[in-house]
Amino acid sequence: MGSSNLGPDEWTIEVYERPDGSCPYNRFLKNLDPYSQLVVDICVKEVLTRQGHEVCGTSWGTPLGGGLYEFRIRESLTSLRKEVQVAAPEGIDEGREILLRVFFAVEGARIVLLLSGYDKGKNSKSRRQEREIMKARELLNEYRRS
C-alpha cells in the first residue's frame, strides 16, 4: 500500500508481511465492512502519511513503548471530511462513527510499518486491548528478528 506521490514531509506507508506470507494488517482491513475500510484508508492516507509517529502528539495516537504505536480511529466520515477535506462516495451513510485501532512502528527514514489492527467498537474491554497490544508487540519483535 505504499504511497507514490509523496511530498517532502510525508511518510511512506508499508504493511508488514510475516515470513509465512500472511499480513495481519491486511486481514484486519479485509474483515471490516466497506464503510470502515474507507474511513481507515482515508485516515491512513490523510493523517498517518502526513504525521507519522507525530500523531502521538494528538488525539490520533499514543506511544505504547518499545517502538510500538497505536493509531486511534474514532471518527465518522462526516467529521473526518471536515478535518481532512476529502470527498466521500455518494450514497454512503457518512454519520456512522467507528472505533478502530491500528498498531504500527516507525522504520528507517520516514517509514510507517502497519502491523495489525482491531475493531475496538465491537469489543472495548481492556482485556481485549491488552491482548491486541501483545499480538502487535509479537509482530514487531518478529519483524525485527527477520
Image: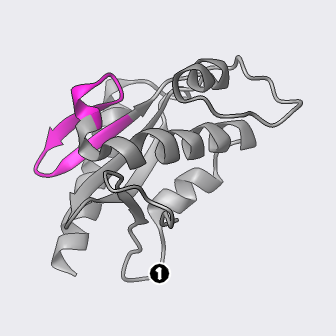
Q: Quadrant of residue 111?
A: bottom left
Q: Quadrant of residue 112?
A: bottom left
User: Does residue 39 appear left or right of residue 48 in this picture?
Assistant: right
Q: Is residue 133 above or below residue 99?
A: below
Q: How many marks?
A: 1
Q: Residues within 10 Å of mark 1 (few under 14, many from 20)?
A: few
Q: Which residue is found at the position 73% from the left and 22% from the top?
A: 94
Question: Looking at the picture, which amino acid does disc 1 mark?
Answer: Gly
- Where residue 2 sits: x, y (%)? 48, 66
Q: Is residue 43 above or below residue 45?
A: above
The answer, for residue 52, to whether it is visible in the render is: yes
**Range shown magenta:** 55-71
Q: Is residue 2 above or below residue 133?
A: below
Q: Which residue is found at the position 16% from the left and 77% from the top?
A: 145
| Viewer-nearest residue: 100 or 109 | 109
- Where residue 113 sits: x, y (%)? 33, 60
Furthest-front residue in this view:
8
User: Does residue 52 appear left or right of residue 109 in this picture?
Assistant: right
| Viewer-nearest residue: 127 or 79 | 79
- Where residue 88 sits: x, y (%)? 74, 33
